[in-house]
Each structure stands twice: as structure tokens, then as C-alpha cells.
Image (spheres, grey):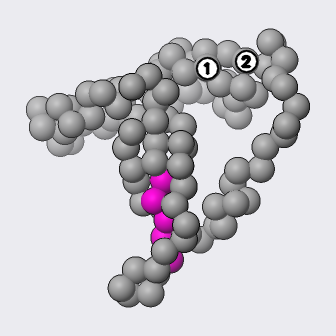
Amino acid sequence: KSSFISSAQTPISSLSKRSNEPAKRDDIYTDPIFGMRIVKPLISSATLKERMVGREAVPFARINNYLQTCHKEKDWVIAGVIANKSAVKTSQKGTQFCIWTLTDLKN
């Protein structure tokens, strides 16, 4: 799992509205870059492949190693699922934020 900090401009609760209906088999596909199964994807696999041109997909298990050994100017991408969202916190400067814990569902 990794964590990243998100600005709390949009309430987190509004980002997680989900339908409780079970997904149909034809609504599920495996993305061609990261191998994640996605229900009702918002972008097509062709669009994902197009947006990944010139970028490298980095699995969570390789992030630390990649950061130590890669060229800093190289463009890279991670993909994951939000596993946990912290309560909204306030920084010392008064800015609200929350911490998202991400996972690739593999490790």
C-alpha cells in the first residue's frame, strides 16, 4: 500500500458514490497496461493505451526501486485502488487535506 495526499477541494464522500447493483460480466474488463479488472471503465482501453504512449507503467512493488534507479526526467504512471481515506485534516497553514491509501490489489 502507498499513501498520497489529496487536496480536500471536493468532499471525499462525493467521490465514492457507488451503485449497489452487482456488475454484469460484460461490464468488467481487464486493463491492458496494469492488468487490473475494472467494472464500467470511464475510458476505453484504446484511450488508455494512447495516453500511456511515452510513459512507463510502474507496479507498486517496484516504486521504491524505480525512484532510486530511474532517470528523473522519465514520465511514469502508477494505477491503484483507494483502499482507505483518512478523515479530513487541517494543516498548520489552515489548508484542509486527507490521505488516501492506495493499493494495486496484488501485494
Point out residue 55 in the picture as x, y percentages from the top left corner.
36, 30
Instruction: Locate the N terminus by quadrant.
Output: top left
Pointers 2 and 1 in contact (CB under 8 A)? yes
Residue 20 is left or right of residue 75, and the answer is right
Give the residues drawn in magenta, as a range. Answer: 96-100
**Residue at x 60% of width, y 26% of height:** 47
Q: Is residue 15 above or below residue 62?
A: below
Q: How far, Cα to Cα, is label 2 from label 1?
A: 7 Å
In the rendered structure, find residue 28 and report the number of the disc placed on it: 2
Pick the front one: 101 or 32: 101
Name the residue carrying label 1: 37
Question: Which residue ends up furthest to the bottom in the rendered image?
Answer: 93
SS state under label 1: strand
Question: Which residue ends up furthest to the right in the rendered image?
Answer: 21
The part of the image, by quadrant, that contains residue 71 is top left
Which three-letter amino acid code belongs to the residue tagged 2?
A: Ile
Point out residue 17 in the picture as x, y percentages from the top left corner.
77, 50
